[in-house]
Image (cartoon, rainbow, N blue to C red):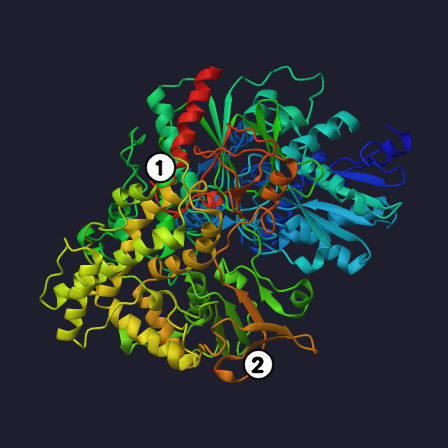
Amino acid sequence: MNAAVREQLQVSNSILETIGDTPLVRLKHIPVSATTEVFAKLESFNPSGSVKDRTSYNILQKAIASGDLKKGDTVIESSSGNMAIGLAQACLLLDLKLIVVVDPKLNKATEQLLQTYGATIKMVTEPLPEGGFLGARLAKVKELLQTTKNSYWSNQYGNLNNPLTHHQTTKEIYEALAGSLDYLFVATSTCGTLMGCASYIKEHHPQTKIIAVDAVGSVLFGGEAGPRNIPGHGAGVTSQFLNEHYIHDFIKVNDLECAMGCWELLKKESILVGGSSGAIISAFHKYESQLEEGARCALLLSDGGNRYLDTIYNQEWLLKHIPGVYDSLTPIGGWKVQPVSEFNVAIIGVGPKGLYGLERLLATIKEAEIEGKIHIHLYNKNHFFGAGDVYRTNQPSYLKMNFANEKIDIRPTTKPEPITSRLKNYVSWLSDYLEEEESSLTKKISSRSTVGKYLSYCFEVLVAEAPKNVKFHEHTEEVVAISRKDEFLQIETSSFSHRKEIVQVNQLLLTTGHAGNLTPVSAKEKKNASTIDFIYPVSRRLLTVHTNSVVAIKGMGLTFIDACLALTEGREGSFLGKAEEMHYIKSGNEPRLIYPYSRSGAPMIPRVGAMPSSPSLRFFTVEHIHKLKKNSSYKFNFEEELLPLIQKEFTYRYYKLAFKNAGETLTDALAFEEMQKEIETFHHKHPAEKGFNFDELKDPFSSNENYNSSTVRQYLEETLAQVSLASKSPLLAAISAWHDISPIFNELYSFGGLTAKSHQVFDTEYAPFFNRISYGPPLENMYKMLALLKVELLDFTFGKSPQLEQLAHQKLAISTSLSNTNHQVEIDYHIDARIPKMNMKTQCSRLYQHLLKSGLVRPFQNVDAENSYFTGGIDLTENGNPIDEEGKVIDNITVYGTPTEGVTFDNDSLSRSRNDFGSIWAKNAVKAINTTN
């Protein structure tokens, strides 16, 4: 030690007086640029080893000085790390008792330290649905405060003495650097340290830029909460201290990058630090390219690495808990432990289809009695595992399902049996959830969020009941690339860093749609209008739509209805009354006008819980289809061969019930031509009965030149009156035919079973029609649309194939020339409310763009002797395996659900049986596991 420094040392009166004045060390080997200066503020030199010594002592001092705390009282705090230890040391010296609320992430070293200091440990074992383990810990703190006499909450999350502490921390940095600093990097948690530094900088050195370092899976700077294996930074709930205006930028770092930063600092500078400090090293590298030449940076390193010896610096722990670590870092002296030869599978997109694939995989593993270790990597863009985006559990209750409760059931219809009897059908689960009789819940329709809770419950049950040799890894990140490495697949997720997180797996199930933006507004127009490409989650995406604005909505399907309800009922508007008597009371927060539009201008036909009973198919049958097929490779012409049979089936169903309602019987055995004669006679006898016309059902406004709000209202009122008849509705009986036809049609359509030209005709003209009539919203929601039309909030003036135009003064206008008049209105917002569909050639996510560019997949093309048609989907085998650009089958990838559209038909997200590639994948994965073992 320098003699001059030695002379300055003084005797301290207690260990707590040694807090602060921690060293600042120049890091010579961390920056890439020789001109960049980097200094590390080593808070591990505080007596209990972290920056939290400052916080805990200052909070306790101020509480004692104010009289809020006195000797013998009990301090209560939520912490699984440094704050707990700082408090434990201080409380012991100040003659205070301490209760620390922790969660299962508490490491053994910290637990032993707390017990040694005499602290009482209370552990919460279950995270809260909203708020995670931190939320559960805070709830326990509040409970303890009610039951513990003379207790005081130090409240590192809300006590203003937390951030005020770090004015001194920051002052020390500037004094050591003679006031010259360009960037300060600080890790986040409570944000007390961050905001204390930031407020000092804002007051004294505003030229310094402060960079916040957050965790992937933290909600502090937005995003969804997710699992984190390395504690110390990030949070599952928002901070009471954080003011983003004080922060220049933020960087998110994942667990792998934390570990890499820790080991880099150790190897290059011989400094042993904790997880949040490793995160700062990785964050610095991510930001390094943005630094000016000669920049001077300080890194506030919160703690040392001694308490991480059994985690970050333990090779077995790293290999077990940090995917990709073996290929991403090398410990000093090399790896002493090799990765166990274990089988890895992945599911990308854990909505309902991913959930079904997981269920089948676990059941097949159990049936095969596999004993080897199996890792299942689950990738979802948010934390709604099992539910996915469509059924996320935090949606408003007015976003409803479009079929009855009894239709929902996660349980499979095929062997093997599920791994647990705790899996229930939806009605049974809902009965327990609502504490109501099952009989009162059938024929009713639930909200999508409630169905999401059921799916999430099923996911949690599967994870809890999985065989003990199965290890789960949940990744709340978007997958951006899949590539081949030998016989393995490498999965890459999005990251701010050039050092991406990469996981290597043996088998993969791909269910995510990740469709691109559908809005055909030009880039120039998008800059000049408020264009909303996707409305979910509605509470966030539609927040920017101002009160009293004019909105155009493209599409009149389920998404359109959700958008309308979000802009009305979601803004405190009220629907009063029922059915045709329903009316809407404005709140004043709505847009002034909503202009819906689509190609046909026709709203959806709603559904009811009690549908008409359905007779067997008479015309669109396997026997009739078989007669049409000339050979095994024959392709059907949809319009010429299949459509006539569909039209007959609709007509038959309609009149079968219409006759019954009138007390008559339609003769089933008649040929269609003879049946038509009976129908003519029926209308002569019952002239008031409405006739059925398939073409009118398909395009109700084809011959109506006077299309406007009045004609749409009349159409809606007539349609709703017919649907309201429920089990006695001939219209619903006709429509129900499609539900029975579609499984047969799926077999004819899939893998290019239609002629190329008629395949294209079906996709563009008939698939939207069948969706409009068969998968509509619940009847209640269409009555809501009618109520909005009555108060002239909905306006269908431009409802049928209008034009979008850009005006000279940088706004969009919508116009129509129907009824031989030209009409144009300026709009403030344009919302795309169509159902996203993927097109591999023109619009898809980064993942599918990468797959296509790398040649791992190729677009599906239906080819016959006369034409060819690119559907937009992926070329697949009949087992759901993609075919690469060279024509080779990628047999360790299986595609399921949305990304198979255009190759298969009708991938209803909740269907367990339609195009069930998940079961095929599970069998093949288990076969591969057995082969490997």
* Residue 303 image point, x, y percent: 67, 36
* Residue 462 image point, x, y percent: 37, 35
Q: Nearer the viewer, residue 790 or 164?
A: 790
User: Residue at horizontal 38%, vertical 24%?
Assistant: 365
Kindly tell me whether residue 73 is visible in this rendering.
Answer: no
Residue 881 vertical position relative to residue 295 in the rendered view, above or below: above
> Mark 1 sits on what residue?
461
**Which badge, 2 or 1, comes first in the chain's sequence?**
1
User: Residue at horizontal 42%, vertical 55%?
Assistant: 767
Q: Secondary structure at mark 2?
A: strand
As shown in the figure, which amino acid type bears the numbered disc 1?
Val
Label 2, label 1: how many angstroms apart (C-alpha)? Answer: 55 Å
User: Residue at horizontal 30%, vertical 37%?
Assistant: 412
Residue 729 vertical position relative to residue 125 in the rendered view, above or below: below
Q: Quadrant of residue 93?
A: top right
Kindly tell me whether residue 60 is visible in this rendering.
Answer: yes
Q: Quadrant of the N terminus?
A: top right
Viewer-nearest of discs 2 and 1: 2
Q: Nearer the viewer, residue 890 or 665?
A: 665
Q: Secondary structure at mark 1?
A: helix
* Residue 852 image point, x, y percent: 61, 40
Label 1 crowd (10 A; few <14 / some 14-19 / many >=20): some
As shown in the figure, which amino acid type bears the numbered disc 2?
Gln
Residue 14 vertical position relative to residue 416 in the rendered view, above or below: below
Number of marks in picture: 2
> Mark 2 sits on what residue?
824
* Residue 31 image point, x, y percent: 82, 37
